Image (cartoon, helix red, strand yellow):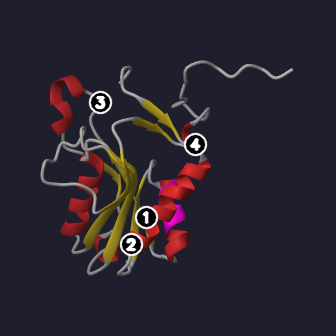
């Protein structure tokens, strides 16, 4: 990923992406499934804009031993709602980015297995990294080939993002 182009977004950029998504999401949804951690902020913004109150979360983990299992490893669901919370509901499944597509596709398939009707939604879709040739998000705000750095990822937690150079102190 060192050679991948990086794109740093501002909160204004995120607002523009949400504004681009909302008109696409007509038809109504009875529930929203937010994928942690990346989907928390976009999902919250969309839920507020669309007045969706039935909010659920899914936490998915893939094995760390990528050398042995590759990108095709089976997911481990750390958290997932009970089937009756999804059954017969049009559910908007939200994450920040569709890169390989593994996480959101796993969640979508679990919603289907629970008897729900999932529709996937992301801020950014990266078709070059997509592992599923016949699948893409139902809704997305932008297509990219860059590693997107969202404003909530900057200088926080263990996933600190280091850009070109640290800011110079002001005098």
Q: Label 2 vs label 3: CA separation?
A: 35 Å
Q: Earlier in the sequence, mark 3 or mark 1?
A: 1
Q: Earlier in the sequence, mark 2 or mark 3?
A: 2
Residue at mark 2: 25
Q: Mark on residue 139? A: none
| Residue 60 visible in the shown view | yes
SS class, disc 4: helix
Observer-nearest of 85 and 147: 147
Q: Residues within 10 Å of mark 4 (few under 14, many from 20)?
A: some
Q: Earlier in the sequence, mark 2 or mark 4?
A: 2
Residue at mark 4: 151
Q: Earlier in the sequence, mark 4 or mark 3?
A: 3
Kindly indicate whether the residue at mark 3 contacts the one at mark 4 (C-beta within 8 angstroms): no
Kindly indicate whether the residue at mark 1 contacts the one at mark 2 (C-beta within 8 angstroms): yes
Kindly indicate whether the residue at mark 3 contacts the one at mark 2 (C-beta within 8 angstroms): no
Main SS, magenta region, reads helix
- Magenta residues? 41-46
Q: Residues within 10 Å of mark 1 (few under 14, many from 20)?
A: some
| Residue 143 on image: x %, y % | 34, 48
Assess whether residue 47 is covered by the magenta stretch. no
| Residue 81 visible in the shown view | no
Q: Label 2 vs label 4: CA separation?
A: 24 Å
Residue at mark 3: 64
Q: How many marks?
A: 4
Residue 61 is left or right of residue 68, and the answer is right
Kindly indicate whether the residue at mark 4 contacts the one at mark 2 (C-beta within 8 angstroms): no
| Residue 54 on image: x %, y % | 45, 75
Residue that extends furthest to the right in the rendered view of this protein: 171
């Amino acid at each position: 990923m060192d050679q991948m182009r990086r794109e740093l977004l501002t909160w204004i950029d995120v607002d523009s992406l949400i504004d681009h998504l909302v008109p696409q999401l007509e038809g109504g949804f009875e529930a929203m499934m937010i994928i942690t951690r990346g989907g928390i902020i976009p999902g919250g913004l969309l839920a507020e804009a669309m007045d969706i109150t039935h909010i659920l979360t899914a936490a998915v983990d893939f094995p760390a031993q990528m050398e042995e299992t590759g990108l095709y490893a089976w997911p481990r669901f750390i958290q997932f709602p009970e089937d009756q919370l999804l059954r017969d509901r049009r559910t908007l499944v939200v994450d920040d980015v569709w890169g390989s597509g593994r996480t959101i596709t796993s969640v979508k398939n679990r919603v289907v297995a629970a008897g729900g009707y999932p529709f996937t939604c992301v801020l950014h879709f990266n078709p070059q990294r997509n592992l599923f040739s016949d699948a893409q998000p139902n809704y997305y705000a932008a297509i990219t080939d860059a590693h997107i750095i969202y404003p909530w990822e900057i200088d926080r937690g263990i996933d600190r993002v280091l850009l070109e150079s640290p800011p110079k102190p002001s005098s």
